[in-house]
Amino acid sequence: MNALRNRVQLIGHLGGKVEVKTLDSGKKVGKVSLATHETYKNQKGEKVTETTWHNLVIWGKQVEILEKYTDKGSEIAVEGKLTNRDYTDKEGIKRNITEVVVSDLLLMGNKTDQNA
């Protein structure tokens, strides 16, 4: 059961191009937002779509793949774990952010999208 602890799987569309930084150690890290959509009917029977945004952190070879083959709107599937961290913004206010640290990813879409 330990393999199921803190495990996240998402399929969604990228909110922009992945932002890549190369650290002093030479490792690459990327950050990008991912939108997931849930559609349901409300009490009036109207179709409603809700969008949730997730912050992704991607390391190494996987960030190079995202940088090379994806753009804003690209559909991807990710698996990883949730992490929380604190930081202080430019105004000196302490903030908390939840991120998905990606351990595995899959580029989605049909073949015509990939060849375009």
Image (tube, rainbow, N blue to C red):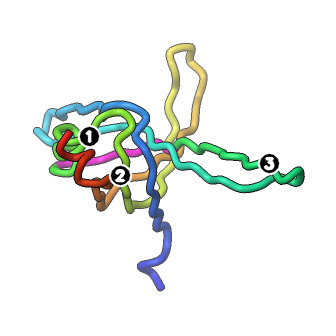
Residue 98 at x, y = what percent? 53, 46
Q: CA distance from mark 3 to mark 1?
A: 33 Å
Q: CA distance from mark 1 to mark 2?
A: 9 Å
Q: Which span of residues is magenta-colored?
A: 54-60
Residue 39 at x, y = what percent? 65, 53
Mark 1–mark 2 contact, CB under 8 Å?
yes
Q: Nearer the viewer, residue 20 or 27?
A: 20
Q: Which residue is mark 2?
A: 76
Specify the quadrant of the image occupied by residue 21: top left
Specify the quadrant of the image occupied by residue 26: top left
Mark 3–mark 1 contact, CB under 8 Å?
no
> In the drawing, does residue 21 fall left or right of residue 81?
left
> In the drawing, does residue 14 fall left or right of residue 112?
right
Q: Which residue is mark 1?
A: 70
- Mark 3 or 1, closer to the camera: 3
Callout 2 environment at 10 Å: few (<14), some (14 to 19), or many (20+)?
Answer: some
Amino acid type, callout 2: Ile
What secondary structure is the stretch in magenta mostly built from?
Answer: strand
Q: Which sits earlier in the primary sequence, circle 1 or circle 2? A: 1
Q: Which mark is residue 46?
A: 3
Q: Is 25 inside the magenta-drawn segment?
A: no
**Helix, strand or loop at disc 1?**
loop
Mark 3–mark 2 contact, CB under 8 Å?
no
